[in-house]
Amino acid sequence: VLVPQWSGKFLVEQYRLDFGTGSELEKYNGCYNKDGAWRFGIDRPVYYQQESDETKIKAKFAYCKKERKWYFFKGDDEDACNENQMLAYSSLSSSYDIERVFQDPWYLRGGAGLEVSSEFGGIGIGGGCGITKGDGKCNVDFNTADFEYDGGDCCAATCNQPICGLGVLKQAFETTLNADGDGYQNCLNPVMVDVKIILHEVKVESYKEPFLPYNMVNSSPPLLRFDCNGQNHLMINVEEEMENKTELIRVQDGAKCKV
């Protein structure tokens, strides 16, 4: 068994970690890649945080033989046993396989328990490594319970970034929009409830502006805005083709909404 382990046959090449939204280690969420370099005296791989546009931290996981634990640490020092740069550590382990290690409890530097979810295959790996939960953009591949519905990005009531829902709607009320709208049509969180809006009658009036030539009129479509608890859930230009059509909006149960 040891020969394949040393050769890397049983070792994970890449995995994704999530320390949770709001955790003190949240900025270390993302993918980690196995370093292919062999180091004298180190018989287990080192995993480095994959760089992205958001982070250049390069945190890493490595095994500390002296303590018989895997350490999560940052800094230039390659010594995993240097407690001055340690962020978290595993339970006692002799495993070569980092996937197996994440099945046991992890702890913060001060000894408090650490909740961490890990993924070793699927949509969160490979091309999905550049995707960040909770960034204000709804990534449909991460819009599942396992990923906390993309960290809340896909519903108005749970999205907390300035760009939430902006300019993402191409269609509303069964009509292709002439201008992109704001909204959350991919909200799947089951704690939300449905609100249906029906446009019974739509009139777009034209009017003459004093500064326009005599043969030109202004025809600005009316704006529809739907807010709940002070959070915008839908904002579009209303068009005549939307008459007698419906749009479903998902809101927090008990929310106070207005059009």
Image (cartoon, grey):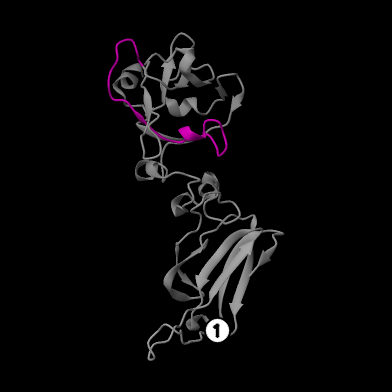
Where residue 46 appears, as percent x and y from the top left, is 37, 22
188 or 228: nearer the viewer: 228
Where residue 34 appears, as percent x and y from the top left, is 34, 28
* Magenta stretch, main secondary structure class: loop
Image: 59 above or below 77: below
Question: Seen from this angle, which residue lies furthest left?
Answer: 37
**256 lies left or right of 147:** right
Q: Quadrant of residue 194?
A: bottom right
Part of the protein shown in magenta: 19-43
Q: What residue type is disc 1 on?
A: Val
> Mark 1 falls on what kind of element?
loop
Question: Seen from this angle, which residue lies furthest top?
Answer: 66
Question: Can you identify the residue that label 1 sits on?
Answer: 202
67 or 203: nearer the viewer: 203
Residues packed near mark 1 inside 10 Å, few (<14), some (14 to 19) or many (20 plus): some
Residue shown at 42% from the left, 17% from the top? 63
Question: Seen from this angle, which residue lies furthest bottom?
Answer: 215
Question: Seen from this angle, which residue lies furthest right?
Answer: 254
Residue shown at 61% from the left, 73% from the top? 197
Where residue 252 appears, as percent x and y from the top left, is 66, 57
**197 lies left or right of 62:** right
239 or 110: nearer the viewer: 239
Give the position of the N terminus as an image quadrant: top left
